[in-house]
Structure formats: C-alpha cells, structure tokens
Image (spheres, rainbow, N blue to C red):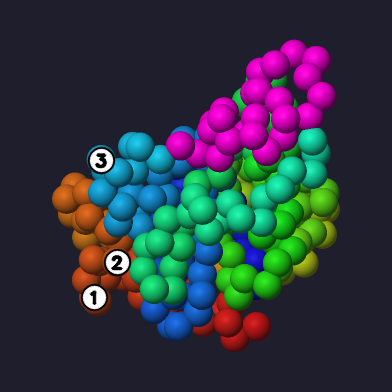
Amino acid sequence: MKILIAGKGGVGKTTISALLSLELAERGFEVLALDTDSTPNLAISLGVPYEEADKITPLSKNEKLVENRTGARPGEWGAVFSLTPKVDDLIESYGIKINEKLSLFVVGSIDQGKEGCLCPAIALAKALLRHVLSGDKPIVVVDSEAGAEVFGRGLAEKFDIMLCVSEPTYKSLKISEKLLRMGRDLRISRELLLINKVQDEDIRGVYEEIFAKHPIPWIAIEFDESLKVIEGRKASLSELPASSPLKAKVKMIAEHILGR
C-alpha cells in the first residue's frame, strides 16, 4: 500500500506521517517512510536525535551521490545526465532504521521549480520514488511537500490513497478541496480528509458547504496539548501517552486504511 500525505504548509502533515508510520509498524507491517519536503523533519518526529537529524543529507542535496549515479553534478548547465540511474540499493545503503519494522529515507524536494537547476538531483530523486512506489514494500508512507502537483503523472498514479491534512478553517479546507481534486485528476482513486487541530469549531457545516458536490470520508482530529510537551522535549512522537486524542485518531485512520 502506497500512502500519500498531502496538504498546505503547517497543517500537521509530518506529525500525521510519523504517527501513522509508527502505528502501522506497531501492528506488524513493514513500513518505509519517505520525507519529500524541502525542509525535511520527519526524522525528528520519528525520534532521531536532533544532532543526528541535522547531519542527514537529503538525496536531492547529496551532490556527490547525484553525480556518481547520474553522471552530472547538480547545477551544471548543459550537462548530459542519466534519467534512469541505479537506485535499487539506495534505501538499504542510505536509509535510517527507526525500529525493527520501520525505516526512513530522506528524499528532499522533488519540485524542479523550488530546486532551480538541480536537474540531475531531481532525476535521481524521482527515479528512486518510481522504484519504491512500484516495488513490493508492504507499506510506503510519503510525507509530501505542500501541494500534490509535484508528483505529477507517472508518480501520482502509483499511490493507493491520498490523506489530505487540513486545519479547521474555511481557507484551509478550500485548499484541501483543491488538492483532493488535483489528486483525483492525477488518478489517485482513494482519498481521506483529515481535519487537524480541532478545538471548538463547528466544522461539519463548513465541510458540508465546501464538499457538497463531492463528499469524501473525513476524520476530525482534536487539538492535543500533549503534543506540545513531546515536541518541547524533542522526543519521538511514539512517546505520546495512551490517553492522547491524537494517537487515538491515528489508530482510527489506520483502521480506515487497512479496513478498505
């Protein structure tokens, strides 16, 4: 199962990605978490110490590796480089083992526009994603950069489900509606809306207004004070207490995904 977690910046994509990866691994599934954000921090959420996380070089920024695999240095104008570089050993060689069932690989951004002229780097990153998403890894969770368009055709079709994370505001839900529509245009057939950080908002009425023409399954996730404590301690999200409403809702999300 290949899971894309999308949404605008700051809605909690990385938190959901980390907790879902941990939950699925705890259930006995082999899980590979991929961080494709331009400012990756999924490692920290999964419990990698800050000092070690700071030393991680995303694949799309690893100039020596990019040159070795594609034949061209990132930023080299007019260079001829391979669009089909060797990638089948990268997860094993450069991945990070979180626990017995869960691994992390930091890809970095695959958005050409944000990376300027790093064409060989983007080619290598996309080749790795194609390899992973077409492979037999039981579950792949992708923490994406804001927006889903960076995946485009040829990558998006390989996802089984898109989880779109939103804040409980009209503006954020409108953006999520657009991203979900974009996902459908890219042939991602299954979708789930996660309305995060809910406190006292009456979100049902706003949801029904925005998604009246195309209602989709959705789950409201209550604002969780214990998350602040965990992040303040720079601890893994696995240390959220059993009473955490956020952790309870992630279990519900996992049940929804696995039940389908």
In the image, residue 125 above or below residue 258: above
Give me the C-alpha separation between circle 3 and circle 2: 19 Å
Q: Is residue 163 left or right of residue 20?
A: right
Q: Quarter holding the C terminus?
A: bottom right
Look at label 2 and name its amino acid: Ser
| Mark 1 surroundings: few (<14), some (14-19) or many (≥20) residues within 10 A | few
User: Bounds of the magenta span?
Assistant: 57-81
Q: Nearer the viewer, mark 1 or mark 3?
A: 3
In the image, residue 73 above or below residue 131: above
In the image, residue 54 above or below residue 173: above
Q: Residue at x 45, y 83 (%)?
A: 28
Q: Residue at x 50, y 79 (%)?
A: 29
| Mark 2 surroundings: few (<14), some (14-19) or many (≥20) residues within 10 A | some
Q: Quarter holding the N terminus?
A: bottom right
The picture places residue 144, in percent across and down from the top left corner, at 57, 48
Q: Residue at x 33, y 37 (%)?
A: 54
Which numbered dot is residue 243?
Answer: 1
| Label 2 sits on residue | 238
**Nearest the eye: 194 or 127:** 127
* Residue 180: quarter of image: bottom right
Secondary element under disc 1, as helix, strand or loop, is loop
* Residue 89 visible in the picture: yes
Disc on the earlier residue, 2 or 1: 2
The residue positioned farthest toward the top in the image shown: 77
Which numbered dot is residue 51?
Answer: 3
Look at label 3 and name its amino acid: Glu
Which numbered dot is residue 149?
Answer: none
Disc on the earlier residue, 1 or 3: 3
